[in-house]
Image (spheres, rainbow, N blue to C red):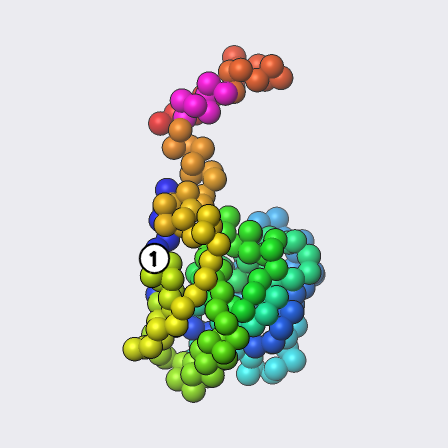
Amino acid sequence: MSQVKQVAGRIIPVTGNDIDTDRIIPARFLRCVTFDGLGENAFADDRAQFDGTHPFDRRDYQGAKILAVNANFGCGSSREHAPQALVRWGINAIVGESFAEIFFGNCAAMGVPCVTADPETIKTLQTEIANAPQTPAVVDLEALEIRLGERAFPISMPAGTRQSFLDGTWDSCAQLISQPEAVNQTAQNLPYLDWNRLVPIQN
């Protein structure tokens, strides 16, 4: 199981409240069989309107690992494609004023911490990064702070979710395969399964 204690990298700011999953990844890209290739279409319609000046298109933000957003980010539909698109673009952590509950849960299930900060902090982060995009940053789940250069700002995350990242238990599939004996024993006791036709999980 993989622990997530810190995410280091540069920040990319995307401003605006109530950015929904349709904007993060437009519906026409949901016909894919896998999530591969979604990253290049993240914010596709917004980027088309900005004609190359959207943060996801700007050269100085390429390679950024941390997304800074405003309130109610990821609202709208429950599609997992939205966080998948962000991850495949390169995002490994998101800091914002608030997140839609299902989007937050989808991110947590993928190992992407979504942490919150007060509006003044988010505005400061977005403004300072816009002026100096190369400034290094760290989202620190142990210290519950985000560091931008030499400055540190407090962040928040629900205690249970935070602990799952620190312990490495956020990955439910990894938890299952780490306990093959218990899984096999449970499967043997399920009346609707023919255990003789199944291949037990191996260490």
Point out residue 160 in the picture as x, y percentages from the top left corner.
46, 48
Q: Mark 1 sits on what residue?
A: 142
Residue extending farthest to the top is: 196
> Which of the 4 image quarters holds residue 154?
bottom left
Vertical comparison of 108 with 90: above or below = above
Magenta span includes 92: no
Q: Could you tell me if residue 20 is visible in this image?
A: yes
Q: Is residue 152 above or below residue 116?
A: below
Q: Where does residue 188 sit, x and y in percent of width and height?
A: 51, 16
Residue 182: percent from left, percent from top? 43, 23
In-front residue for pair 192/33: 192
Classify the position of the C terminus by image quarter.
top left
Seen from the viewer's position, the closer of residues 29 and 113 is 113
Q: Is residue 47 above or below residue 139?
A: below
Q: Residue at x 47, y 58 (%)?
A: 157
**Residue at point 65%, 65% (across, down):** 20
Report crowding for label 1: few under 14, some 14 to 19, many 20 or more residues within 10 A (C-alpha).
few
Q: Residue furthest left?
A: 150
Q: Quadrant of the N terminus?
A: top left
Asked whether, in this view, residue 127 is left or right of residue 166, the answer is right
Decide whether the magenta segment is chiefly helix, strand or loop: helix
Magenta highlight range = 180-186
Instruction: Name the secondary structure under disc 1.
Output: loop
Amino acid type at image mark 1:
Glu
Quarter of the image for residue 151 reads bottom left
Q: Inspect this view and state whether residue 91 appears.
A: no
In percent of the image, x 34 and y 57: which residue is there?
142
Which residue lies at the image location 64% right of the left edge and 54% below the top edge?
79
